[in-house]
Image (cartoon, coloured by chain):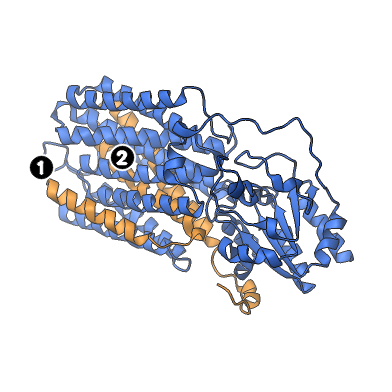
Amino acid sequence: MNSTLYSLIGLAAGVAFILALKGLSHPKTARRGNLIGAFGATVATLSVFLYVTPSHGEDIGHSLPLHNLGWILGAIVVGLIIGVPAARKVEMTQMPQLVALFNGVGGGAAALVAIVEYLNLGDTATTAEVIFTVFTVVVGCVSFSGSIITFMKLQELMTTRPVVFPGGRFVIAGTLAAVLGVSVWVVTALGTTPLLVLAVLSLLFGILFVLPVGGADVPIVISLLNAFTGLTVAASGYVLSSTLLIIAGTLVGASGTILTRLMAEAMGRSLFGTLFGAFTAKPQAVSESGEERPVRSGSPDDVAILLNYARRVVIVPGFGLAVAQAQHTVRELADLMLSKGIDVAYGIHPVAGRMPGHMNVLLAEANVPYDQLAEMDEVNPTFGQTDVAIVIGANDVVNPAAQTTPGCPIYGMPILEVNHASNIIFLKRSMRPGFAGIENELLYDPKTMLLFGDAKASLTKVVSALKAL
Amino acid sequence: MDAIAIISIFTLAVFVGFEVVSKVSSTLHTPLMSGANAIHGVILVGAIIVADHSETNLELGLSLAAIVLATINMVGGFVVTDRMLEMFKPKKDSQGTSQKGDSK
């Protein structure tokens, strides 16, 4: 294959990626868009085996096949064996952390590619190439280690609260300064040692950068790191003279940046506040615990009676619902209420679950009809006419503190205003606060009834109690 | 490649990237992020190129690690995105009941 054909295939793959992103932006074409992207990536990968990219200083590459072909194919097989089962078997509830992990390994791959090419170039590297290499190594490593931390937060392998330690902001600022200093060192002095130091410092910075981010803001950070990885891919495309990598990486970098902003808007968060939380956050005072406050807890029969005489019920599903795998039971309850002539809607917070749109995926999995799902802006004005709001495994997204308590970590986040409903039922496992780790005053409200226990078991009892009425 | 060509490609790609996702409902944020995530898995192409260029065992080892990671990113990313989107497809049985629905 000659270089013109190879370049044209690269261009075609670039076009496929544009069509993929375009398709993914609309519900009807989303799946097709993803397949077009996969097709483009496959074709691009196959074309590399048929054309040898010349090393630097050479006009044409060596003859086919590629050097180390056996190793290359073996490594791809290893990647397939790890990646495909992980993607196919993952529970939809755990999907956000898998996406974070995939993003992290992509960033790691880009950093490794840049390091190898740098070792390979040695003294022949131009200043521009070194600068792009430094960029790829720094941002790729930050994306890698940062994604690992977001993975651990989402998987709850570590605390989901912001990790802030005394003097943290100075440590972070110092690390960043060291990263920049060593970057200059690499560009001026060259050599392998400075680059490895740079990689280690960047990994450290990635960790420090994500630690202070609170659980609720993690999706925004994943999206941002995703855009970062895109830019590293574009930069390594420069070093490798690959138009395809430049196009694909830049596309992801640009669309990822916009998507990050859209997500932050949907969550009512300032991007700046999220990212530089480390510099503004104070170690949180533990809320006035120790004092036991009374809550009103009810039985499944109490709940059923309340529902039976309601005219309008809004179900607010949260991550707890998904964890308990209660989507199907919730649908059963909703169908039962509909058959009794009760008006039922699901109020979906944009970030219900762990990521924007996550809850829609989970409910779609349970065949909940799309027209019963109401977005926040549609459902909020109707809470005044709602007799019962059932909050299932959700907490932060209905916490009025977001509107009333300036300074609390979720302040400013739009919420589902269930506090305007005549009655509120919380299905909870315990009094434990939500993902963001904030106490919810609504739990102590006189019009609130709590039904403790596993969401699925509780709902099943409510369904049978309601059937009996 | 000359600098002007690269800057042109980069600039145009930035604008295309901005344009294609500027309006997207929050329902699709997660699949879109996941799909974009899979697309940057094409760093696999770069990983294969550096594996071909590798002259020392260190270089080869690092580039093979890059190939493994990039493959996971790319293939895993597209597969998981497809699984998510599979659930959005219209279901025939629920279609009948949702016909009479007015909103959406």
Estimate the spatial distance between the alpha carbons at disc 1 and disc 2, rounded to whole Å: 21 Å
* Residue at screen point 17% across, 36% down: A128
The secondary structure type at the circle numbered 1 is loop
- Amino acid under disc 2: Ala
Q: Residues within 10 Å of mark 1 (few under 14, many from 20)?
A: few
The furthest residue to the top: A193
Above or below: residue A147 compared with residue B3: above
Query: Callout 1: residue from which chain?
Result: A
Above or below: residue A261 compared with residue B95: above
The secondary structure type at the circle numbered 2 is helix
Badge 1 is on which residue? A59
Count of all numbered marks drawn on residues in the image: 2
| A363 to the left or right of A51 | right
Q: Tell me the quadrant of the picture where the C terminus of chain A can be found.
A: bottom right
Residue A435 locus on image (x, y percent): 61, 41
Name the mark on residue B96. none
| B103 to the left or right of B7 | right
The reply to whether the C-beta atoms of the residues labelled 1 and 2 are less than 8 Å apart is no
Q: Colour of chain A?
A: blue
* Residue at screen point 22% across, 47% down: A242
Letter of the orange chain: B
Above or below: residue B14 compared with residue B100: above
Residue A176 locus on image (x, y percent): 35, 28
- Amino acid under disc 1: Asp
Q: Are marks 1 and 2 on the same chain?
A: no
Between A378 and B45, which is closer to the camera in this rendering?
A378
Badge 2 is on which residue? B47
Residue A137 visible (yes or no): yes
